Amino acid sequence: MQFPEDDNGQMLAAMADAGIDLTKSIEVDFFLVFDDQRDAESALEALSQTDMQGELELNFDEENTKWEVIVCLQMVPEYAALVGKETELNSFAQEFDGISDGWGVMQNQGGDNEFADDDHVHGEHCKH
């Protein structure tokens, strides 16, 4: 498979090299980061009112002292779809004074040996 020469393309290449079937739907986590707890909670509430099919989680990242909304979506990890969703969520987060912090795969997917001990595949702006 050929992937674009950017961080998202490199992540997809690494996932493919690790044996993840990129033609099948998997859980992909998108990370939205906020300085203020109220902004993160407002964003979480607004997301929960949309028709987006996925799971939402709010965490406090003690290392970076930031609030993080994790949007877990079941999707085929196709480059354009990932970039499109990341762009959409970044625009959404900005409405609440937040930003997108990339995306990743949080669990050991079928055949995923390289990332078995890692929490997720690191995104373009990911600081995890």
Image: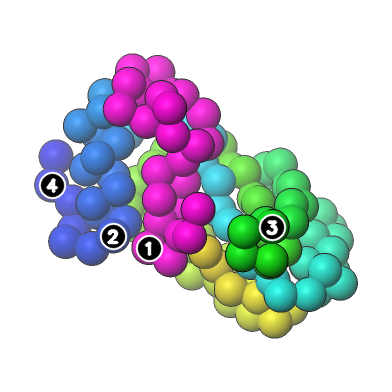
Amino acid at circle 1? Glu
Residue located beneath label 4 in the image? 2
The disc, 2 or 3, on the residue closer to the chain's N-terminal end is 2
Amino acid at circle 3? Glu
**Seen in the image, is 41 located left or right of residue 34?**
right
The reply to whether dot 4 and dot 3 touch (C-beta < 8 Å) is: no
Amino acid at circle 4? Gln
Residue 72 in percent (x, y) is at 62, 43
Q: Which structural element holds mark 4?
A: loop
The reply to whether dot 4 and dot 1 touch (C-beta < 8 Å) is: no
**Badge 2: few (under 14), some or many (20 or more) residues near its Cα, within 10 Å?**
some
The reply to whether dot 2 and dot 1 touch (C-beta < 8 Å) is: yes
Position above or below: 96 against 101: below
Residue located beneath label 2 in the image? 7
Position above or below: 22 against 95: above
Q: Please identify the dominant SS of the magenta region.
A: loop
User: Looking at the image, is mark 4 or mark 3 nearer the viewer?
Assistant: 3
Front position in the image: 84 or 71: 71
Q: Which structural element holds mark 3?
A: loop
Residue 103 in percent (x, y) is at 48, 53
**Residue at the spot x=22%, y=43% of the render?**
13
Residue located beneath label 1 in the image? 124
